[in-house]
Image (cartoon, rainbow, N blue to C red):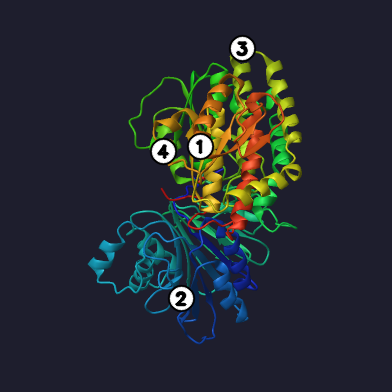
């Protein structure tokens, strides 16, 4: 099967549809892509009818473009009111990189003669040179409009060969979907280094930048330098010389079904409530040594390097500790830092890349770097067929189910479950002790059963009420407890917009304690017997500065001035991160609600960070 490196480099989204009600289909399609970014959106469709033009609407030659700023619902309001009839449409969601979010800069872009409309993911690095050398008159600040003008300029009577000729002049990355009145009833697609998939069903054809957001029975991942021509019920794919490729050789790719909101008001809450099931599903997939032997081919190595971003990195911090407990040397790095530091080759290293989406550009590029350096690579991801799965040597899947809320919740718990399983599996590979592996599987299932969100929601709401007016919050802990603090503080800040910092508890007194006063809440996590007394001392130091401690611990606390004490059940210490984070996910959620924020779509953030 021919599957390319499905590489993500862009946070925008493309959706094109050819068939009945194409406008409605594209609007639904780009809504599914909203998770990648949403500061503007637009649609172009073929139609014989001209609409009244205004700041949102432009007519070309049998093509009309409608665009708007802000969330996709802003575009939807205009488009769906007009009852538009078209069988060929392309749409785009934009997360601004070249030029501010504005109607002018949104895609699709029309050529000057109005005969070409184009949407684009990726970055054309030489667009300014092309613009200047050829004296092109552009209206927007984008690289994409330059491509629309090039298509017009170099049109040679054959649409596909014109597209190819123009692509050959471009440096950088692109996934293009193009419609043109020179060849109606077709969508043309070109790809280099930006993901794009094409598909068709009985009476329709479709193109999308995200494999899991595409509607279609027969889906193909385009290779670099390939072109596709999509019609109703059929697709033709061509190589870089425009030689036709037999699609039966490409192999149809399976996609993951998206989650539904059901009775929930937000995906985030739904996804937190799904945590116990998600953990059990993940554990059940890897609940025996044979399955792991098949997936990992009894990998042998001396050292582990874990790499990820954001929440995935925080899961890695726990993984590091779990591997160290098995006597395996392990380092954990932030992908965007790792890529630019000197590479020190520790012989015999397994590099593990953690990514919920499997699309994070920094993580994927760090993976490629490690491969170049000859390391064995393993991806832990939640999304089958995501870019990372095509690059890594081995893949292990979290079975969290689709995670739509921008704040990662159930995926994090499942990443932790995988690290627990791997730590005991690697121990088995080294020492042949399978009992510890199977005990771990049993324990993980019991912990999943212990997570009872409905029981803890009242206390979480209560804490949210207390803290939501804060200007600044700190979270402290040592060892595994510090890793809990790191993830908890990211969760709180990303959706509440309250400044929140995690500190190793012992480090506070080396500077940051000067910021603690009577208005400061400090969350303290104390779950590890060996270091509990040390953290309790740090809590006393905070209380002495009138800081307001919110304590999570199974241990007795003697400091009467702690303002909130959440006594968590006694469980084996290594499972506390998996267990306690749920409180903090819920507290963050309720705090965001109290502040009037949409927890599913925090400002300036997108679900997949596919820019570096
Ligand atoms: O898809 P990934 O796991 O690679 O994403 C990494 C981070 O962008 C992600 O975890 C981010 O930090 C979340 N918004 C946190 O909730």
Labels 2 and 3: the sequence-earlier one = 2
Side of 560 relative to 522 (left or right): right
Q: Give how far across and how far down residue 393 sits, in percent.
A: 52, 32
C-alpha distance separating marks 4 and 3: 48 Å
Q: Is mark 1 within 8 Å of ligand 1?
A: yes
Of the numbered discs in the image, which one, if any, rests on residue 313?
A: 1
Q: Residue 243 placed where, x, y %? A: 46, 56
Mark 3 sits on what residue?
Answer: 431
Return the residue nearer the eye: 144 or 460.
460
Q: Image point 61% across, 21% down: which residue?
A: 529
**First reached walking from the N terminus: tag 4 or tag 2:** 2
Give the residue displayed 29% in from the left and 74% down from the top: 137
Q: State the separation of the CA atoms marked 2 and 3.
A: 68 Å
Give the number of the mark in front: 4 or 2.
4
Q: Disc 4, disc 3: CB below 8 Å?
A: no
- Which residue carries the number 4 mark? 514
Q: Residues within 10 Å of mark 3 (few under 14, many from 20)?
A: few
For the residue labelled by badge 3, is the local secondary structure a helix, a strand or a loop? helix
Say what secondary structure mark 4 lies in. helix
Which callout, 4 or 3, points to the residue nearer the camera?
Answer: 4
Q: Which residue in the protein does label 2 denote?
A: 182
549 or 331: nearer the viewer: 549
Where residue 458 appears, as percent x and y from the top left, is 72, 47
| Res 246 visible | no
Looking at the image, which residue is at 54% across and 56% down?
A: 602
Q: Secondary structure at mark 1?
A: helix
């Amino acid at each position: 099967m021919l599957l390319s490196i499905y590489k993500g480099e862009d946070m925008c989204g493309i959706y094109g549809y050819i068939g009945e009600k194409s406008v409605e289909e594209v609007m639904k399609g780009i809504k599914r892509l909203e998770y990648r970014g949403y500061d503007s959106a637009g649609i172009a469709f073929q139609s014989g009818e001209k609409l009244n033009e205004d700041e949102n609407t432009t007519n070309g030659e049998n093509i009309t473009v409608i665009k708007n700023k802000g969330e996709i619902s802003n575009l939807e309001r205009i488009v769906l009111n007009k009852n538009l009839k078209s069988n060929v449409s392309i749409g785009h969601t934009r997360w601004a990189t070249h030029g501010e979010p504005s109607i002018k800069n949104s895609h699709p872009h029309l050529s000057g003669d109005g005969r070409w409309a184009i949407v684009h993911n990726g970055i054309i690095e030489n667009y300014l040179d092309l613009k200047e050398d050829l004296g092109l008159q552009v209206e927007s600040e984008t690289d994409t409009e330059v491509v629309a003008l090039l298509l017009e300029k170099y049109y040679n009577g054959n649409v596909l060969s014109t597209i190819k000729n123009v692509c050959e002049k471009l440096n950088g990355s692109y996934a293009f979907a193009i419609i043109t009145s020179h060849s109606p009833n077709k969508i043309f697609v070109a790809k280099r280094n930006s993901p794009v998939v094409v598909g068709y069903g009985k009476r329709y054809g479709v193109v999308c930048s995200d494999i899991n957001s595409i509607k279609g029975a027969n889906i193909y991942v385009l290779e670099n330098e390939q072109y596709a021509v999509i019609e109703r019920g059929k697709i033709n794919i061509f190589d870089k010389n425009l030689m036709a490729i037999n699609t039966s050789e490409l192999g149809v790719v399976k996609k993951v079904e998206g989650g539904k909101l059901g009775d929930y008001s937000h995906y985030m809450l739904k996804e937190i409530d799904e945590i116990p099931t998600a953990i059990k599903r993940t554990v059940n997939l890897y609940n025996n040594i044979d399955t792991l032997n098949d997936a990992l081919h009894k990998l042998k190595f001396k050292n582990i390097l874990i790499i990820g971003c954001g929440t995935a990195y925080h899961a890695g911090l726990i993984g590091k500790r779990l591997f160290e407990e098995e006597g395996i040397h392990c380092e954990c790095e932030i992908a965007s830092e790792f890529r630019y530091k000197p590479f020190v080759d520790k012989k015999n290293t397994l590099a593990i890349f953690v990514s919920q989406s499997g699309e994070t550009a920094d993580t994927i590029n760090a993976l490629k770097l490690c491969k170049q350096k000859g390391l064995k690579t393993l991806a832990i991801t939640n999304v089958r067929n995501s870019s990372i799965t095509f690059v890594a040597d081995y893949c292990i899947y979290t079975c969290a189910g689709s995670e739509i809320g921008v704040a990662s919740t159930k995926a994090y718990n499942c990443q932790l479950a995988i690290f627990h399983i791997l730590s005991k599996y690697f121990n088995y590979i080294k020492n042949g002790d399978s009992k510890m592996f199977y005990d771990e599987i049993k324990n993980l299932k019991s912990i999943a059963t212990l997570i009872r969100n409905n029981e803890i929601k009242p206390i979480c709401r209560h804490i949210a009420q207390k803290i939501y007016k804060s200007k600044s919050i700190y979270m402290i802990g040592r060892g595994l407890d510090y890793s809990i603090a790191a993830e908890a503080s990211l969760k709180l800040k990303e959706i509440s917009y309250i400044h929140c910092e995690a500190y190793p508890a012992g480090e506070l007194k080396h500077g940051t304690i000067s910021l603690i006063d009577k208005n400061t809440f400090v969350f303290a996590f104390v779950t590890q017997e060996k270091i509990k007394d040390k953290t309790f001392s740090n809590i006393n130091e905070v209380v002495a500065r009138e800081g307001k401690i919110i304590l999570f611990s199974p241990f007795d606390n003697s400091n009467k001035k702690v303002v909130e004490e959440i006594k968590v059940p006694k469980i084996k210490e290594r499972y506390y991160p998996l267990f306690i984070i749920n409180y903090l996910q819920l507290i963050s959620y309720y705090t965001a609600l109290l502040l009037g924020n949409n927890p599913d779509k925090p400002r300036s953030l997108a679900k997949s960070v596919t820019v570096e």
